[in-house]
Amino acid sequence: MIPFFVPGGMGPPELLILLFMAVFYVGIPLLGIVAVFYYLDGKRGYDERISTLERRVEELEDERS
């Protein structure tokens, strides 16, 4: 059976500090990377959409001629 309290082990304040540091050093940079990825992906999406619309306009102009 595992004892509830381990002498010399970490207590709640130390565990909270470790959790805070993990969020600070891992979570925030990960959030930043995801935000940059979605920002750049959105810009590329607009370029694709514009090129698709330009091709469609050219097709419609060719049909009209």
Image: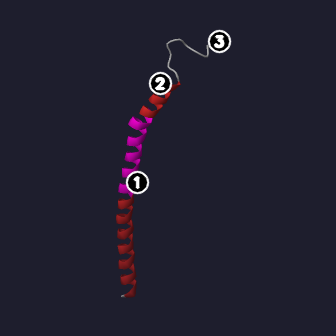
Principal SS element in the magenta part? helix
Left/right of residue 62 with respect to residue 1 in the rendered view: left
Look at the numbered disc 1 and give the secondary structure of its residue. helix
- Location of residue 57 in the rendering, given as x and y in whole percent from the top left corner: 37, 78
- Location of residue 8 in the rendering, given as x and y in whole percent from the top left corner: 49, 13
3 over 35 or under it: above or below: above
**Distance of mark 2 from mark 3, alpha carbons?**
24 Å
**Callout 2 crowding tier (Cα within 10 Å): few <14, some 14–19, many ≥20:** few
**Callout 1 crowding tier (Cα within 10 Å): few <14, some 14–19, many ≥20:** few
Q: If the image is split into quadrants, where does the N terminus sit?
A: top right
Q: Residue at x 40, y 84 (%)?
A: 63
The region drawn magenta spans 22-41
Look at the numbered disc 3 and give the secondary structure of its residue. loop
Reply yes or no: does residue 38 show up in magenta: yes
Q: Looking at the picture, which amino acid does disc 2 mark? A: Glu
23 over 18 or under it: above or below: below
Residue named by callout 3 = 1
Q: Mark 2 or 1 closer to N-term? A: 2
| Rendered image: mark on residue 14 | 2
**Distance of mark 3 from mark 1, alpha carbons?**
48 Å
Q: Residue at x 35, y 55 (%)?
A: 40
Reply yes or no: does residue 47 show up in magenta: no
Q: Mark 3 or 1 closer to N-term? A: 3
- Location of residue 59 in the rendering, given as x and y in whole percent from the top left corner: 38, 78
| Rendered image: mark on residue 11 | none
